[in-house]
Amino acid sequence: MHERVRRVRAALDEHGAATEIVELPSPAPTAAAAAEQLGCPVGAIANSLVFAVDGAPLLVLTSGAHRVDTRLLAPFLGVSRNRIRRAAPEFVLAATGQEVGGVAPVGHPLPIRALVDVTLSDYEHVWAGAGMHHSVFRTSFTELLTLTGGEPAVVSSEQTPSKQVL
């Protein structure tokens, strides 16, 4: 087991998450690729995206069916939109200890503020990265909130008001 996956496993164990880390047959660089290999809807894939907000990392766990809209994040975070930037791969690696495409919601060197897409609550089970491009674990919206200390948020303009559980 790779060190990054071991750190994710340790974080899951620390929170009492008894889920299994699954190694996919091949790397899953997109939510669609992961969903195809897992046999689940693309919306049940929890993408871990890292943004830089005034130099601090922000983890946004979004449904694979959505793109993050920083116009929605800005008022939620209390900053102007131009202060939110998609993080460069080097920044992501430094903040999470994991490479883009394999970022997990847990197992980072230091805690990172997290927002969790409310649309993930539509699925009984969601799949999140486990530290490498080909590793994932099954969880739930509620468990993601607990694992990350995250806040539920509407992160995409594609979401409808009925899906908001705020």
Image (cartoon, rainbow, N blue to C red):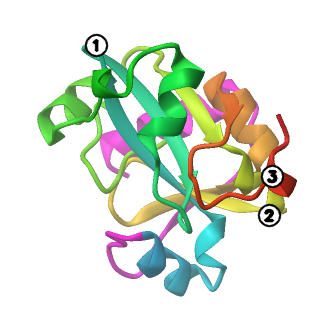
For the residues bearing labels 2 and 3, Cβ distance under 8 angstroms: no
Q: Is residue 108 visible?
A: no
**Residue that protrudes farthest toward the left in the picture:** 90
* Residue 112 placement, left or right of 51: right
Q: Which residue is depicted at the point 63% across and 39% down?
A: 116
Give the mark nearest the N terminus, 2 or 3.
2
Question: Residue 161: which numbered mark, if any?
Answer: 3
Residue 150: where, in percent of width, then height? 65, 26
Q: Bin the neighbour count of mark 3 within 10 Å (Cα to Cα): few under 14, some 14-19, many 20 and up.
A: few
Question: Is 17 included in the stretch rendered in magenta?
Answer: yes
The answer for how far apart the CA atoms under marks 1 and 2 are is 33 Å
Q: Which residue is depicted at the point 16% across and 38% down?
A: 88
Above/below status of 92 relative to 25:
above
Give the mark nearest the N terminus, 1 or 2.
1
Q: Bin the neighbour count of mark 1 within 10 Å (Cα to Cα): few under 14, some 14-19, many 20 and up.
A: few
Question: Residue 11: which numbered mark, if any?
Answer: none
Q: What residue is pinned by disc 2?
A: 123
Above/below status of 58 relative to 47:
above
Residue type, mark 3 in image: Pro
Q: What residue is pinned by disc 1?
A: 54
Q: Is residue 84 visible?
A: yes
Q: Bin the neighbour count of mark 2 within 10 Å (Cα to Cα): few under 14, some 14-19, many 20 and up.
A: some
Q: Quadrant of residue 137?
A: bottom right
Q: Secondary structure at mark 2?
A: loop
Q: Which residue is depicted at the point 16% across and 41% down?
A: 89
Residue 148: where, in percent of width, then height? 61, 28
Q: Nearer the viewer, mark 3 or mark 1?
A: 3
Q: Quadrant of residue 128?
A: bottom right
The answer for how far apart the CA atoms under marks 2 and 3 are is 17 Å
Residue 19: where, in percent of width, then height? 71, 51
Highlighted range, magenta: 1-30
